[in-house]
Image (spheres, grey):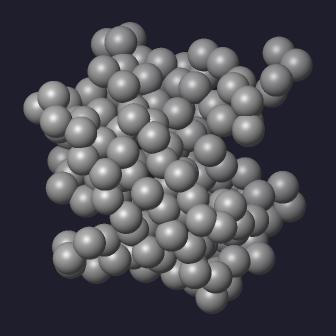
């Protein structure tokens, strides 16, 4: 997958492992690691600000059926050797299907938006483009940590645990 913070160059990450609880571990050549759970970035290691863990209440919904669903998640972040834990509350909106360019390939994907508020920070929005048949997220733009710019992901090919 390609991943980058808005305003920064793209990095190529390769799928390194399938982890328990439907998590995927991605590595970059620079030694960074990103862990995703469905469309969400839930951990980042080897980066300036490390996201150590993300927990969801209730469990992560199937975004195809999440219209109006409210969720809460806790972030455990390390900034300059200091651990910070904060909460975000969100509400999902399921949009329509549309043509979306993912690495030069046009895919028909459903747009899901997530409106987020986080402990006194200004409200922000995350966007996910998912396959309507299997729920796989091919592209996203999400604020992983509210003090950072949006993090963008485009997946090159569907991960295959049998490969």
**Image position, residue 113 (x, y; %):** 51, 75
Which corner quadrant of the image does residue 121 belong to? bottom left
Q: Residue placed at 73% from the left, 38% from the top?
A: 21
Residue 30 in the image: above or below residue 41: above
- Quadrant of image for the C terminus: top right
Which corner quadrant of the image does residue 130 belong to? bottom right
Toward the bottom, the furthest residue is 68
Q: Nearer the viewer, residue 133 or 46?
A: 46
Callout count: 0
In-image side of 90 versus 81 (left or right) = right
Q: Residue placed at 86% from the left, 61% from the top?
A: 133
Q: Nearer the viewer, residue 77 or 46?
A: 77
Residue 108 in the image: above or below residue 28: below
Q: Residue placed at 49% from the left, 55% from the top?
A: 140
Is residue 104 visible in the rendered structure shown here? no
Residue 27 in the image: above or below residue 89: above
**Image position, residue 60 (x, y; %):** 66, 61
Q: Residue placed at 77% from the left, 76% from the top?
A: 65
In-image side of 11 versus 158 (left or right) = left
**Image position, residue 29 (x, y; %):** 38, 11
**Image position, residue 49 (x, y; %):** 23, 36
Q: Nearer the viewer, residue 43 or 162?
A: 43
Is residue 32 visible in the rendered structure shown here? yes
């Amino acid at each position: 997958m390609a991943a980058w913070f808005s305003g920064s160059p793209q990095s190529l990450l390769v799928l390194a492992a399938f982890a328990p609880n439907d998590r995927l571990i991605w590595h970059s050549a620079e030694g960074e690691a990103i862990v995703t759970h469905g469309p969400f970035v839930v951990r980042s290691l080897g980066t300036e600000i490390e996201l150590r863990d993300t927990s969801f209440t209730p469990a992560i919904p199937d975004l195809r059926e999440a219209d109006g669903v409210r969720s809460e998640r806790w972030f455990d972040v390390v900034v300059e050797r200091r651990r910070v834990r904060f909460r975000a509350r969100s509400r999902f909106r399921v949009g329509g299907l549309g043509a979306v360019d993912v690495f030069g390939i046009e895919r028909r994907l459903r747009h899901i938006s997530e409106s987020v508020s986080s402990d006194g920070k200004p409200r922000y929005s995350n966007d996910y483009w998912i396959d309507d048949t299997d729920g796989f997220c091919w592209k996203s733009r999400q604020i992983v940590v509210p003090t950072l710019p949006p993090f963008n992901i485009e997946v090159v090919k569907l991960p295959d645990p049998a490969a």
